[in-house]
Image (spheres, grey):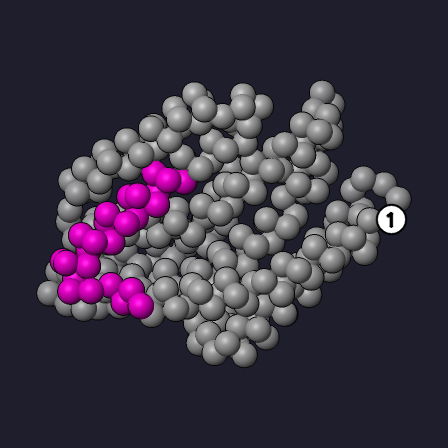
C-alpha cells in the first residue's frame, strides 16, 4: 500500500486526465497527439515520482519503525518492513510506465494486447520468485520478493514499449530517457540532505519526533534542492509542472 500510494495520488490523476484525450485523438486519427500526450504525461508524472522515490528510499526504514514498531511488532521486524519497502520503491517508475502504456492500448481500443503481454511478464515474475525460493537464504526471500514483482512490470513495459512504438511511429524514447536520467541525477543531492537530516535529529529524545523532524526538514529542504538542481540541469518538465501548479492554485 505504501509503495502504490505515490502512484495512486500522482499517476492516477494523470491517467484520468489523459485517457479521454488520447481516445479522442485516436477517434480523430491523430496518433501523433496520442504519442505526445503519453510522453508528456509520463515525464510530468516522473517529476514527482522520482524525488518521492528517493525520499522513500532514505526514510523507509525509520518511517516504518515509527509506524509499525507498536504492539507485537518489534523494532527489528519494523526495520525489515522498511527494507522491503526500499526494494519496492525502486520499481515505482517502471510500475507507473507499465500502467500508462496499458491506458494507451485502451485508448487505441485494444484490450487484448495488454492481456497477452502479461503472459511473458508473469513467466519472468514466477521464474524469478521460484529461483529466490530455491537458491536464496530463507531469511532473505521476503526481502527480495519485490524484485520478481517489479520484474513483471519491467518486462511488460519493455514489450509494450516496442509494440506501441510501431503503432504510434515512435514514443519519444530518447527525450524520455534523457529526462529520467536528469531527474534521478537531480534527486541525489536531495536524498543526501534527507540522509544527513536523519543524523542531525537523531539526538532528539523519543522514537517519533526524531523521524518526524528529519522527514520535515529533509522533505522541505530536499524539495527545494531538487527543483534548483533540476533547473541547473535544464529539466524543463520541472518548470512546466510548477507553472501548471501555479495556474491551478490561482484558479482556486
Query: Which residue shows up at 51% across the image and 37% down it?
Result: 1
For the image shown, how many numbered marks are present on the structure? Answer: 1
Query: Which residue shows up at 43% across the image and 52% down it?
Result: 93
| Residue nearest the viewer, comparing 139 with 46 | 139
- Give the image location of residue 127, x and y in percent: 33, 28
| Residue nearest the viewer, comparing 114 with 182 | 182
Left or right of 29? Residue 67 is: right
For residue 196, above or below residue 98: below
- The single residue placed furthest to the front in the displayed view is 135
Left or right of 26? Residue 174 is: right
Q: Which segment did they paint magenta?
A: 150-174
Asked whether 160 falls inside the magenta stretch, the response is yes
For residue 86, above or below residue 47: above
Asked whether 249 falls inside the magenta stretch, the response is no
Say which quarter of the image contains residue 191: bottom right
Q: Main secondary structure of the magenta part?
A: helix
Residue beneath disc 1: 204
Any part of residue 249 in sight: no
Amino acid at each position: 500500500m505504501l509503495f502504490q500510494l505515490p502512484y495512486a495520488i500522482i499517476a492516477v490523476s494523470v491517467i484520468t486526465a489523459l485517457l479521454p484525450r488520447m481516445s479522442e485523438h485516436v477517434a480523430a486519427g491523430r496518433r501523433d497527439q496520442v504519442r505526445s500526450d503519453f510522453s508528456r504525461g509520463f515525464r510530468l508524472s516522473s517529476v514527482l515520482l522520482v524525488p518521492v522515490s528517493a525520499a522513500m528510499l532514505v526514510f523507509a526504514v525509520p518511517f516504518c519503525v515509527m509506524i509499525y514498531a507498536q504492539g507485537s511488532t518489534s523494532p527489528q521486524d519494523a526495520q525489515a518492513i522498511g527494507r522491503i519497502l526500499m526494494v519496492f520503491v525502486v520499481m515505482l517508475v517502471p510500475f507507473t510506465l507499465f500502467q500508462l502504456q496499458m491506458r494507451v492500448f485502451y485508448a487505441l481500443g485494444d484490450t487484448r494486447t495488454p492481456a497477452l503481454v502479461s503472459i511473458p511478464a508473469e513467466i519472468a515474475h514466477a521464474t524469478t520468485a521460484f529461483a529466490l525460493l530455491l537458491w536464496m537464504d530463507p531469511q532473505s526471500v521476503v526481502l527480495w520478493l519485490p524484485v520478481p514483482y517489479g520484474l513483471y512490470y519491467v518486462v511488460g513495459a519493455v514489450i509494450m514499449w516496442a509494440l506501441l512504438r510501431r503503432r504510434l511511429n515512435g514514443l519519444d524514447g530518447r527525450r524520455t530517457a534523457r529526462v529520467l536520467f536528469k531527474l534521478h541525477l537531480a534527486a541525489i543531492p536531495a536524498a543526501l540532505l534527507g540522509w544527513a537530516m536523519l543524523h542531525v535529529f537523531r539526538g532528539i529524545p523519543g522514537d517519533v519526533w526524531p523521524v518526524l523532524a528529519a522527514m520535515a526538514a529533509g522533505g522541505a529542504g530536499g524539495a527545494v534542492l531538487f527543483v534548483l538542481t533540476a533547473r541547473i540541469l535544464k529539466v524543463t518538465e520541472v518548470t512546466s509542472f510548477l507553472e501548471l501548479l501555479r495556474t491551478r492554485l490561482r484558479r482556486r
